[in-house]
Every structure is written in structure tokens, then in C-alpha cells.
Image: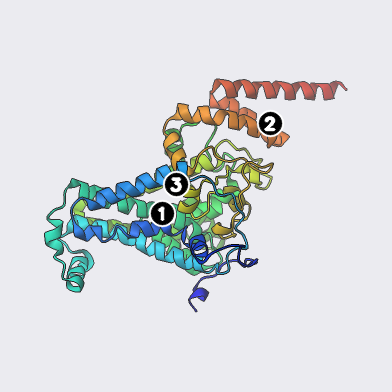
Amino acid sequence: MLFKLFVTKDSAYKGPREGETALMKFWKYFRFASPSFALALGAPLFFLGGEAIFYYGTFLAALAFFGDYFFGEDTEIWAGSYKYTQIFPLMEVAAVLSNSFLVILFAWQLGYPQTDLFGIGAIVQSLTGFDVGAALAANTTLSYVGGFGFATAGGVINGVVLGHNMTHRTFDAKSVWIGRLGEAFSLFTYFSIRHPFGHHNLIGTPADPSWAHRGESFYAFRIRSVPGQYKMTWNLEKQRLEKMDLPVWHYSNQALQGWAVEALVLAMFFYTGGIAGVGLMVLIGLLSHTGLELANYIEHQGLCRVPSEPFQYRHAWDDAHRMTYWAVWGISRHSHHHSDAQVEEPELNFYGNTDKAMSTPYGYLVSFILVLFPNVWNKIMIPRYMEWDEKYATPAERKLAAYENIYSGLPELVDAGMKYLRELEETENEKVAA
């Protein structure tokens, strides 16, 4: 009966893989939940006190970034290999709840023992007999840095990954509702509106504020993108409500509903940590938004689409690095996701490095570091842009890309863009002369 709580699109199961052991079958499903599970293992450290929470968090961060570089790639086709696809929504719910609890625990940590949020400390002490107050007397600044790190990681995964996946199931209200609840713990609820109904329709065009131009630094993109996405969210809700003959300030406004829940989260932090607590929760939200913008930046940067033409695989940078693949529940196979947003993420196919699409040079986590250094990132991407123009772009897209090259201000791209426009002009003049 649990499997019927959530709806997923049908998948044709092809049977077990040859030589697939019980452990391999387990990992095939569990790998996507493993980052949230690893974070959940840190929850008891909030009560044990001391600096263990900081060192465990540092270990997980190092494992994630070094694993993204050293664990290789997974380009296998997994569609049809899952017999129980309904497990994925249930795993996502469990992960949303555990990640949200990490944010709550950080709020509790800020106030305890003066304020025992939801009686968490008293409950733990009554169930275990463990003297929580005495243990937390050993806390240092690093203890709170560790708690903040776990809350931020939980918020980022809730907003950027799980919230994304669950709110994409627009055909299942329960999934969308739980996804939005998880997003509230990273001040991220606008994403459930702007992303499926805005980004997916406009990607690869200047109309999408979350599309990065060639040569545009991440810092400039970050400043431009987020306000544009909030504005788009409001306009999308306004248009939806107008079709229902309702005013924009109606209680049915989903943007307002989400922001109201976010206000409750901020109130929780004010209750335990005062203005400083609110500031820390806002910082968690800012870092979560930055995580999304880092992903937006690398997933489509510089790939041009004619607005009147449908999305094709070539309009996204695919990625197959294992650690990224596990951490983002398969969404790094981005070309397929944008081609069919209702396919469950673990069943997405990888099209990078084929005649259909190109791939990112590094996994998401490593790329997130590289884009912070614009000169380094541009050096990596310039030859990839030029390869896309030559091998993947249609003539109309290549003309758009030529202007992107010129406006980038990067000499090598400017020269390539000017050269292509000259060639195009010469071709058109020859046609006129003929």
C-alpha cells in the first residue's frame, strides 16, 4: 500500500541484469539516497557535543569533492533496470524529512539550553538517559560551524535536488506538496513555480534569467539570475490566477503560500537564536540559492536555442561523473531531463560525448569550484563552445552563437564570431548575385 502513496510514470522493467548480486541491486537504488543518509548519520553529533560534528562534516565534504574527481563516470543505461520505481519517491520523502530535521537541529543547537526547541533535548534525555546539557557544555565555535554546515547541506539537497525532483511530478499533488515543504527549509519555494513552468520552456534563450551567457562570470550571473527568477515566479503566478479570474494577492497564490512557510522557518530561528539566528538561516538560504545558480550556470551556459524551436539534447551539457550522479539523483543527465521532464531521474539516459550532446569537462562539484575563477573556467570552456558551434549547432543556432561569442568579450570567441558572420554575409551576397 505504501507504494501507492505517490504516482510515478510507468517504466518498462526489463528484468534483472546478468550477474547482478543482491548488494548490487540494493546499491542501484540506495546510491541516490546515500548523501542524505550520510548527513543523517551526523544528527546524533548535535547531542554529543564537542567538535566531532565539525570533523565528520569536513570528512563528508572532502569525500564529495575528491570523489567527484576520482570516482570516474557512469554512462550506463539504467532505464528499465528498476523493478520498484515507486521506491524512489518514498526515498525522497525520507531524505526531505531527514534533511529538514538537520535544519531544525541547528536551530535547536543555537538556543539550547536556554530554549529547548520542540522539547528535543528533553525528549532525547528522557529516552536515552543521556545528559544533553552536560555534553553540550563542551561545544566550541567549531561545533556551531559543523551544525551550520549540516543544516546548509541538508537545505541545499532539499532545495536543489529533492525539491526539484518532487515538484517536477506536477501530476502528483502529494509529491509537489512535500517537495515544497522541503524547499521551505532552504527558503527556496519559488523554485517549484519558476523551474518547471518557466525555465523548462525558455532555456537556451535570453528570456530565461537562469541561462548564462558565454564569458559571463558566475558572479555577474548570480546577481542577475536570482532577482530575474523571483520576478518570473511572481509573473507566472499572476498569469495563472488571472486565468482563474482571481487577484494576484489571493490566498491561492502559491508563491505567497511558499513565502509564508519560509517566514515560519525564519520565526523558528528567531525564537532560538534571535536576530543572529535569522541571519544564519538567511545565509543557509543564500548558500542554497548559490548552489542552484552554480548548477544553472554550468548546465546550459552558452548553448543557444532558437526560441520558436523545441529543446534538443544538444541544448544542455550532460554529465556522467559518479559522485555528481549520486548526489543529484541522476539529474546530471540533463539533456534527457529537459527532453522529457517526467522521466524519473534515475532512469535518465546519458547522451554526452555523442553526436547528440556534449558533456561537462568535470563533475558538478569540481566545476562549482572552477567557475569561481572566471579566467580558469573560460580557458576550459572556449574550445568547447567552438566545438559545439562547429559540430552541433544548426545554422540558425550558430548565428546566435556567433553573437554570443562577440558579446563575450573573449578575444578567441570574438574572432570566431566575426569570422562566421563574415562567411555568412559572403554566402548571402553570393546568393543575391546569382
Q: Describe the element under mark 2 as helix, strand or loop.
A: helix
Which amino acid does the dot numbered 3 rest on? Leu
Q: Is residue 164 above or below residue 129?
A: above
Q: Describe the element under mark 1 as helix, strand or loop.
A: helix
Which amino acid does the dot numbered 2 rest on? Glu
Q: Where is residue 417 in the image (x, y as percent from the top left)?
A: 64, 24
Q: Describe the element under mark 3 as helix, strand or loop.
A: helix
Does residue 330 appear left or right of residue 138 in this picture? right
Q: Is disc 2 surrounded by few (<14), some (14 to 19) or many (20+) residues within 10 Å?
A: few
Q: Which colour scheme is used?
A: rainbow
Does residue 90 appear left or right of residue 317 in this picture? left
Q: Is disc 3 surrounded by few (<14), some (14 to 19) or many (20+) residues within 10 Å?
A: many
Q: Nearer the viewer, mark 1 or mark 3?
A: 1
Q: Which residue is drawn at 30% across and 50% down?
A: 57
**Mark 2 vs mark 3: which is more N-terminal?**
3
Nearest the camera: 319 or 52? 52
Say the numbered circle drawn on residue 390: 2
Say the numbered circle drawn on residue 292: 3
Q: Where is residue 69 in the image (x, y as percent from the top left)?
A: 46, 41
Say the numbered circle drawn on residue 157: 1
